[in-house]
Amino acid sequence: MDERGALKPELLRPEVPRPRRALVTRLRRIGDAILSLSVVDAIHAAFPDCAIDFLAEAAPAQAAMGHPAIDRVFTLERRLGAVLPASPGLLGKLRASRYDWVIDLYGNPRSAILAAWTGAPVRVGPARRGRARLYTHPVPPVTEPLSAISHHLRSLEVLGIPPRERWPRIHLTERERAEGRARLDAALPPRGDARVGIHAGNRWPAKRWPEERFAAVLRSLPMLGARGLLLAGPGEEDLARRIAGAIESSLGRAGLAVPILANLALRAHWGVVAALDALVTVDGSPLHAGPALGIPTVGILGPTVPEIWFPYDAGEGHQTLCRAIWCRPCHRHECARMDCMDWIPVRDALDAIRRALAHGKAARASA
């Protein structure tokens, strides 16, 4: 590295030119797009003068918006049954950009074709099936478990950039943060106690913690000097209402309904998360959004391998709730037993939330 921290030319492989313009693609899945920002940061750290673009479908593309190292964010629309992999206008822009590097972190046929279409002299992507021929530097399969962040950074390692794990960050504007604080204040007016967001939903039943345990956590938060609200994405409103209804019904008193914030635009949702004192969530994009926004996050994981998908530092307040079990990883969407989730008790969740809140309080006191 030179005095600016940039990569010295001799560290690159001999056939790899220093990039003046690069494209990073992670076409689908919001959580993976958040994780891919570590690659953007690594390119920028090694080559501060390189212009970096990002390509993804509409929802995951929002993770890259506002990133200080990204020049342009291209949005790829889904084209079911279309002959071309993207609109003619987007194809023209990608070709005209004359990229030196394209880093494809998705590696499906469409993303591989788009990488080849750019004509970039350096194209990196997973060595999967015949499409590996569309890359100049295919990334071989992993032989040992790696965190998802380290896995993405292997795409730069094949070019000679030394691996260095970097935690991704979502960059919100001041307006987005202010609007998020206002939404949170309207739902849970500030009164000096901590405010904890609960995201209980996931499209796959095998990744959901029992509803009654989320209700028990929310009922118990005042013992930790905190209050909670439920966060719900598309299709998760009924789940949130059932949890909130169970709390009100069990307490038997009016006026104790837990507030629900549902169906917010993605970056508006992140604005609310950024205003929380802690986030509790099952697997899914919130598992990565919380740490990427600097919010102590408690991840409740069942079939998910925590070393891969929740590699975040407990020193930053992040906590993992996950019990050792013989059948992990199962990759099932549904399960008749759900032992991996059932074995996580409410008391463990409350202890994890207590640690997360204590870290956040200490961080604010030292700021």
Image: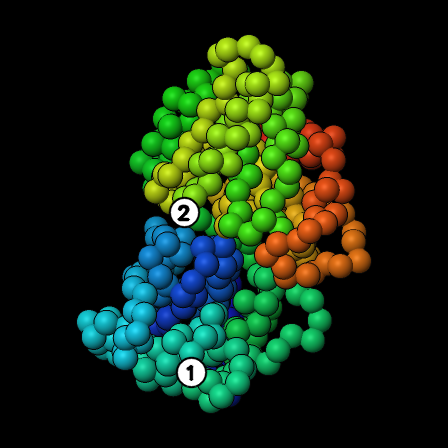
In the image, is residue 350 above or below residue 111? above
Q: Is residue 125 left or right of residue 80?
A: right
Q: Is residue 309 left or right of residue 191?
A: right
Displayed quadrant of residue 58: bottom left
In the image, is residue 48 above or below residue 294? below
Taking the spot 58% from the left edge, 37% from the top edge, the residue there is 280
Helix, strand or loop for disc 2: loop
Residue 312: x percent and y percent? Answer: 62, 50
Q: Relative to the observer, which residue lies in front, 338 or 95?
A: 338
Mark pair 2, 1: CA separation: 28 Å
- Name the amino acid type tagged 1: Val
Q: Relative to the observer, which residue lies in front, 46 or 288?
A: 288
Taking the spot 46% from the left edge, 85% from the top edge, the residue there is 131
In the image, is residue 115 above or below residue 228? below
Residue 248: x percent and y percent? Answer: 55, 18
Q: Residues within 10 Å of mark 2 (few under 14, many from 20)?
A: some
Mark 2, residue position: 171
- Name the amino acid type tagged 2: His
Contact? badges 2 and 1 (CB < 8 Å): no
Q: What label does residue 83 carry, if any? A: none
Q: Is residue 266 left or right of residue 299?
A: left
Mark 1, residue position: 122
Q: Residues within 10 Å of mark 1 (few under 14, many from 20)?
A: many
Upstream in sequence: badge 2 or badge 1: 1
Helix, strand or loop for disc 1: strand
